[in-house]
Image (cartoon, rainbow, N blue to C red):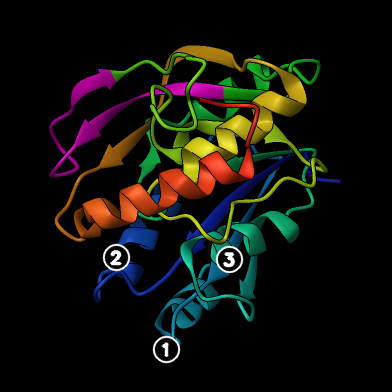
Amino acid sequence: MTLLSIALPVYEMQGRGVEMLQFSLQKLRTQTFSDFEVVISDNSADDDIWEYVESQKRLNIKYVKNKGEHTLSGNVNNAFRNSSGDIIHLMCQDDYFYDNSSLQKIVNNFDANIGWMTSMYMHTNDRVGLFKQQIPRWNDQIYFINTIGTPSCLTFLNGTNLYFDKDLKWFVDCEFYWQLYKKYGEPKILKDTIFIQYLWEGQTTQTITQELVDSEMQHIKNKYMGEIN
């Protein structure tokens, strides 16, 4: 069995899907740690990503078309379900690992007794300059107040049977962190830069409305009625 699965949900990304994936896989090819698989779940309507993945022979890639719900959550969950590693690291398509020791640091620092881990990262808007170091931290209202950060910082034990909530978009990562907390308690925090978050104009965060935020907050309150404020 593979030790580490990189769950990598992908889609067209306004015509930049292959470009984003190409940059991410390039970083994975240089990793010093080798016992990993890349699980690509594809939400694309076209075959551009599939054709690119077919040309990549140097990596252990498991490509699966998402035939379920064509949503962010559905795509992530499809990647989770097809991951065979002992631990899963979630990687957003437009983010990428910081250096060639990133996976080794994840594996060396992950504690199965804690069950999940979040890692430090930095930001870029051109894949050259880096800024704003983000150190994840826990708070007891993580379901609404995201002090952990983007899902690309997340590593957790496989076999948890926990999945992204299909009815969420803006708070989907926060709510998943809450699920993990309910199962394991607070996460281990790795205070070492593991990956880079790429900020660009087509990110999901650019499409969020206040109406959506209010609706999702109510959904979470209803889901955990009596548990949260």
- Amino acid type at circle 3 is Gly
Pointer 3 or 2: first along the chain: 2
Q: Secondary structure at mark 1?
A: loop
Asked whether residue 209 is drawn in magenta, I would say no
Q: Nearer the viewer, mark 2 or mark 1?
A: 1
- Label 2: which secondary element: helix
Q: Which of the 4 image quadrants contains residue 201?
A: bottom left
Sooner in the amino-acid sequence: mark 3 or mark 1: 1
Q: Which mark is residue 74?
A: 3
Is residue 90 something one can see in this rendering? no
Left or right: where 60 falls relative to 85: left
Q: Residues within 10 Å of mark 1 (few under 14, many from 20)?
A: few
Chain part drawn in magenta: 118-133
How far across and down, in percent of the image, does residue 111 sit? 73, 16
Q: In the displayed image of the protein, which residue is found farthest to the right?
A: 1
Q: Main secondary structure of the magenta part?
A: strand
**227 shown above or below 68:** above
Task: Establish if 94 lies above or below 129.
Answer: below
Q: Please tell me whether residue 213 is drawn above or below residue 131 in the rendered image.
A: below
Percent x, y of residue 161: 79, 47
Q: Which mark is residue 19?
A: 2
Which of the two residues, 58 or 91, is positioned nearer the viewer here? Answer: 91
Q: Residue at x 49, y 14 (%)?
A: 138
Q: Amino acid at mark 2?
A: Glu
Residue 1's spot in the image, x, y percent? 86, 46
Q: Identify the residue under disc 1.
A: 46
Q: CA distance from mark 3 to mark 2?
A: 22 Å
Provide the secondary structure element on which disc 3 rests.
helix
Question: Disc 3 or disc 2, which is closer to the eye?
Answer: 3
Q: Nearer the viewer, residue 150 or 213?
A: 213
